[in-house]
Image (tube, coloured by chain):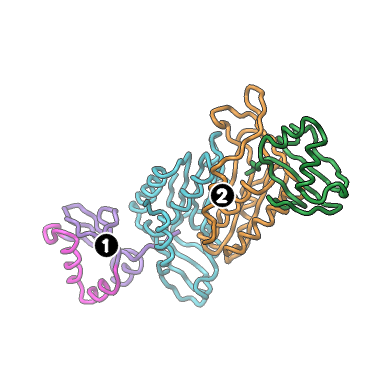
Chain colours: A orange, B cyan, C green, D purple
Amino acid sequence: MISVQEHDFNQQIEYERLKSQTSIGAIVTFTGLVRDIKQGQSVSDLSLEHYPGMTEKCLKDIVEQAKQRWNIIASTVIHRVGHLTVSDQIVFVGVASQHRGDAFAACEFIMDYLKTEAPFWKKETMENGETQWVDARETDQKALSKWAVN
Amino acid sequence: MISVQEHDFNQQIEYERLKSQTSIGAIVTFTGLVRDIKQGQSVSDLSLEHYPGMTEKCLKDIVEQAKQRWNIIASTVIHRVGHLTVSDQIVFVGVASQHRGDAFAACEFIMDYLKTEAPFWKKETMENGETQWVDARETDQKALSKWAVN
Amino acid sequence: MIKVLFFAKLSEQLGCRELQVNAELVQDTEQLFAYLNEQNNQWPAILKAQTWLKAVNQNMTADNVKLNDGDEVAYFPPVTGG
Amino acid sequence: MIKVLFFAKLSEQLGCRELQVNAELVQDTEQLFAYLNEQNNQWPAILKAQTWLKAVNQNMTADNVKLNDGDEVAYFPPVTGG
């Protein structure tokens, strides 16, 4: 299941959805939240822009790549767009597999690719009212290197 | 939070507990479930024995090691014991961090060590009524190698 | 026509989210980029200020891609979702 | 006394979960293991059938450990939780 949406999601509902087959032995979930502090400044709000159409296509491609590399029984990717505030949920990635190794790897792989390839952009509003577009982090590019196939 | 318990746990409650600080940017959860098939045989029930006292101590040690290696804001380990059936939840490991890399690594590290060091033993009842102690998997030993410090 | 989209910081700086370019004026994305630089005297500085990412028909690419009528080309900053 | 515990398959095979050993009879875990082998004529075959793990005072160890009155030693199969 892939969804780009303005409304919030519920951890329990997404977990139960992933859990609905008896052959599942492992479920790994990742949830990304709006942090209150970024590079020392207090964040009050966040707005998320995306590229409708490409976003969904891109997320689907990333999940497809994960399925080719690991044994995945079910997966979910939800990414919110629009206006968010501190502690709000931004993104959910869940993977259900027979064994934990597949679930951990696929979940982290999906997040690492989403972070560098999926067309979302964050704009932060600081407590002093200033707004700024979030800069891409070098560590996100580096995170991809662990998925290189020799 | 570390708990060894007979009763079930709730994903949402554990997730909310991990999420209760505003500096958290990433939450990774792992849930292990009773699978219906093991090495081609149908499993109907599972009973989990443990070493009271050592179990809690061992889980605490593993979490402590994870905290020394990664930036962890909050963590939860719950392991059930006693009688379980197919699709039942066995184990929950949740880690909350500022960044996802720490949360993924710490969560998988805790699970890999729990699998090889925490004194729990599973006994399966097959659909034909036979019982058998689950054998340790070689892949669980191998999983530890990725945490070696050079 | 070729549909050109700008997103996030780039769209704000250019003051433009979307424009249409006659497909006969540009053969490929290199020519499209040159064409965009001529549309407004503020734009060259913005377009050259950093390396913007490019997607052709919703696929990210660093190559110079041949363009046909009906294609969609988007320019945007490095992504920061998740 | 030294408290000796057996778990899981090992406990089932030995037919014993716990026993007390006079601390004066064994100086270390090697001697304890030899002592256990003498308690029942079925036990040596079981105790030598595979490598059991050992914990002294709830710490797993592969070493021969000195024992003192009040210590707790546990033997068990490789763990299979999670």
Q: Nearer the viewer, mark 2 or mark 1?
A: 2
- Tell which of C38 and A103 is nearer to you: C38
- Residue under circle 2? B11
In the displayed structure, B20 sits above or below C55; it is: above
Q: Residue at x 40, y 67 (%)?
A: B136
Left or right, B79 with reference to D57 = right
- Please tell me the numbered disc located at residue C16: none
Q: Amino acid at mark 2?
A: Gln
Q: How many numbered circles does the render carry?
A: 2
Q: Amino acid at mark 1?
A: Glu
Q: Residue at x 37, y 53 (%)?
A: B55
Which residue range is magenta in the image? D22-51
Q: Residue at x 23, y 62 (%)?
A: D19
- Tell which of C81 and A150 is nearer to you: A150
Q: Is residue B5 visible?
A: no
- Residue under circle 1? D18
- Residue A35: x and y in percent read 58, 35
- Residue A59: x and y in percent read 68, 53
Residue A38 falls in image quadrant: top right
Q: CA distance from mark 2 to mark 1?
A: 36 Å
**Residue B54 inside the magenta-drawn segment:** no
Q: Secondary structure at mark 2?
A: helix
Q: Residue at x 58, y 27 (%)?
A: A42
Q: Chain of mark 1?
A: D
Q: Secondary structure at mark 1?
A: strand
- Residue D59: x and y in percent read 29, 53
- Tell which of B83 and B25 is nearer to you: B25
Q: Is residue B97 visible?
A: yes
Left or right, B28 with reference to C67 = left
Q: Residues within 10 Å of mark 1 (few under 14, many from 20)?
A: few
Q: Chain of mark 2?
A: B
